[in-house]
Image (spheres, rainbow, N blue to C red):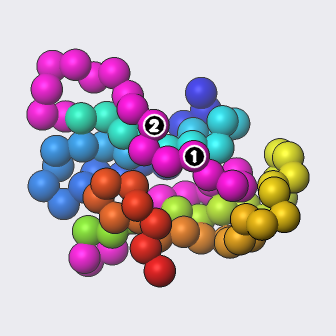
Amino acid sequence: MFPNRVALNKNHSFLLVVGTTRRRILKFNLETNNFEPKVYVELPRVPDNIKMNHKGEFLAALNARRLREIKDDVPDPIRIKYDQEGRILK
């Protein structure tokens, strides 16, 4: 894995790590002794950055160049906003 960026949530209970080559964000729970990551989200493009805003939402920036083509029915965003659980926000 090539970690591109990291972000802590508001109460520092988990850490998000952006994995560029696999196009996903991993979530590490910091409140347990088990630091095995879980997949937070799979991304349609290569991620380039992640930041948390003042509401505790995460903004993932996506690179314009893709590793692979995405499905025609999938939106082609340059950034995606997620809540604490990894759900896409509008």
Residue 71 showing in the rendered view:
yes
Q: Is residue 57 left or right of residue 29?
A: right
Magenta residue span: 30-55
On residue 54, which mark appears? none
**Could you tell whether 77 is left or right of 7 in the image?**
right
The amino acid type of the residue labelled 2 equals Val
Q: Quadrant of residue 67?
A: top right
Q: Label 2, secondary structure: give it.
A: strand
Pointer 1 local density, CA inside 10 Å: few below 14, some 14–19, many at least 20 = some
Residue 69 shown in magenta: no
Q: Amino acid at mark 1?
A: Glu
Check whether the beta carbons of the residues at disc 1 and disc 2 lie within 8 A of each other: yes
Image mark for residue 39: 2
Which residue shows up at 12% across the image and 34% down it? 31
Residue at image x 29%, y 58%?
Answer: 84
Q: Which residue is mark 1?
A: 42
Q: Quadrant of the N terminus?
A: top right
30 or 82: nearer the viewer: 82
Is 46 in the magenta? yes
Query: What element does badge 1 sit on?
Result: strand
The residue under the point 17% across, 49% down is 12
